[in-house]
């Protein structure tokens, strides 16, 4: 992976108040290394979850507590990517007086609490968990898993109270808004380019009362939470594009999913990429029209019956749903999506920037 150097925007840093990971997180048994790589069940751009601007990060595939092999690999990776390198690792691991890390409280609401205030409380909770700068994602998120399995991971995130990355924040945001039937949620992801490298980011779009907003986490304050105040999806996307321009990133693609079910026991998959919009192939007006079309598509989904919940089936003494010998997880064909223009040939991986410096967002 490319070495991140320099002290500019987004240079990899360990946050000062979340570096003391509890000792109980480490266990002695050695399991799978969980090396970051493209999962077989992911699609042609599955690398977005394990590569950030050409800088690879690892995923903890062994569960929690973290096994010893993953723990040691995490610290080796920190030493490689952090400007202070081994000195930082020795300072943290050798400290005997690390402060106790506070555990954020899950938001609780009064019955009359408004939706905007509830969303603000959820965002505050996500922010209090803090962004994970270690280079190792603690929770493995497989996008092809059914919603009920992803909600179990969200519960684990709350239980463990560890720093998270943007995809984990999306799953957590879905879980924390499941009890708000008037709030529709959808994945909203961005692909940007800076200095020859590509960067990917995802937030949870929200729609309620004719207004759009977003929940999420990022290294940058203006690339996560957006208040529920944007009249159209186009206005919301343009707000993110404007923020990216402030970091000299050019927006290349926007991918928008469908509304996510509010049933935490649903066996549906999240539809992550109902529309794939390539800004190099769309004029500003065409881009706006495609976003309007996607908004109509999302509205049409409301009211469609979801697959029955396995929990409800069990209550009727029917047992767990039977699964076939092969994976039951249906993948949407490309024909069902709305990509803009013709498909590009696979992009070549850029070489390291000649200046050895990247702005990571």
Image (spheres, grey):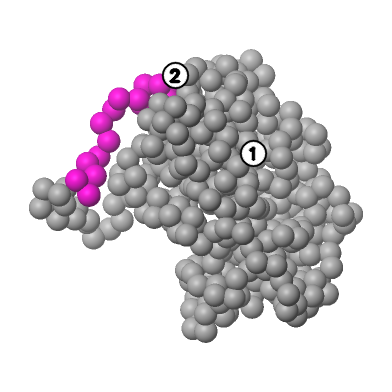
Pointers 1 and 2 in contact (CB under 8 A)? no
Graded by Cα atoms within 10 Å as few (under 14), some (14 to 19) or many (20 or more), the crowding at tag 2 reads few
Question: Which residue is depicted at the point 47% across and 42% down?
Answer: 108
Closest to the observer: 8 or 351? 8
Asked where in the image residue 336 lies, by quadrant, the reply is: top left
Is there any visible trace of residue 341 in the rendered image? no
Q: Earlier in the sequence, mark 1 or mark 2?
A: 1
Q: Which residue is mark 1?
A: 224
**Residue range (magenta):** 297-312
At which x and y percent is residue 212? 55, 24
Q: Quadrant of the C terminus?
A: top right
Q: Does 318 sit above or below residue 256?
A: below
Question: Which residue is depicted at the point 60% across and 20% down?
Answer: 230
At which x and y percent is residue 47? 58, 54
- Helix, strand or loop at mark 1: loop
Residue 215 is one of the magenta-drawn residues: no
Is there any visible trace of residue 55 in the rendered image? yes
At which x and y percent is residue 83? 84, 64
Question: Which residue is depicted at the point 49% across and 55% down?
Answer: 158
Q: Does 250 sit above or below residue 350?
A: above
Number of numbered discs present? Answer: 2
Closest to the observer: 247 or 277? 247
Q: Determine whether, in the image, residue 148 is placed left or right of residue 156.
A: left
Nearer the observer, disc 1 or disc 2?
Answer: 1
Q: Quadrant of the N terminus?
A: bottom right
Residue 308 is one of the magenta-drawn residues: yes
Question: Which residue is depicted at the point 57% across and 69% down?
Answer: 35
Q: Which residue is mark 2?
A: 296
- Helix, strand or loop at mark 2: helix
Q: Determine whether, in the image, residue 191 is placed left or right of residue 79.
A: left
Q: Does 328 sit above or below residue 176?
A: below
Q: Determine whether, in the image, residue 161 is placed left or right of residue 337.
A: right
């Amino acid at each position: 992976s490319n070495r991140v150097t320099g002290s500019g925007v987004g240079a990899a840093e360990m946050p000062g108040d979340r570096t003391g990971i509890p000792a109980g997180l480490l266990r002695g048994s050695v399991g799978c290394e969980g090396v970051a790589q493209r999962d077989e069940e992911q699609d042609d751009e599955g690398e977005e979850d394990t590569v950030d601007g050409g800088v690879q990060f690892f995923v903890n595939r062994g569960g929690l507590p973290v096994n010893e092999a993953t723990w040691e690999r995490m610290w080796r990776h920190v030493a490689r990517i952090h400007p202070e390198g081994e000195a930082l690792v020795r300072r943290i691991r050798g400290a005997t007086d690390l402060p106790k890390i506070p555990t954020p409280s899950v938001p609780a609401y009064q019955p009359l609490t408004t939706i905007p205030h509830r969303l603000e409380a959820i965002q505050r909770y996500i922010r209090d968990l803090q962004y994970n700068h270690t280079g190792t994602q603690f929770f493995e998120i497989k996008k092809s898993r059914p919603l009920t399995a992803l909600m179990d991971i969200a519960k684990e995130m709350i239980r463990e109270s560890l720093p998270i990355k943007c995809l984990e924040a999306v799953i957590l945001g879905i879980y924390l808004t499941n009890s708000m039937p008037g709030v529709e949620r959808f994945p909203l992801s961005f692909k940007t380019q800076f200095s020859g490298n590509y960067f990917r980011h995802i937030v949870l779009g929200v729609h309620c009362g004719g207004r759009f907003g977003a929940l999420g986490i990022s290294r940058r304050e203006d690339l996560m939470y957006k208040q529920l105040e944007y009249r159209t999806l186009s206005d919301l996307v343009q707000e993110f594009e404007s923020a990216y321009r402030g970091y000299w990133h050019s927006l290349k693609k926007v991918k928008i999913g469908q509304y996510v079910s509010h049933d935490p026991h649903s066996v549906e998959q999240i539809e992550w990429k109902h529309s794939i919009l390539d800004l190099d192939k769309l004029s500003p007006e065409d881009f706006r029209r495609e976003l309007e079309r996607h908004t109509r598509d999302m509205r049409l989904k409301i009211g469609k019956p979801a697959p029955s919940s396995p929990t409800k089936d069990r209550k009727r003494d029917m047992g767990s749903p039977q699964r076939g010998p092969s994976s039951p997880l249906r993948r949407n064909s490309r024909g069902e999506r709305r990509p803009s223009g013709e498909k590009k040939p696979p992009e070549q991986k850029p070489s390291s920037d000649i200046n050895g410096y990247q702005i990571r967002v």
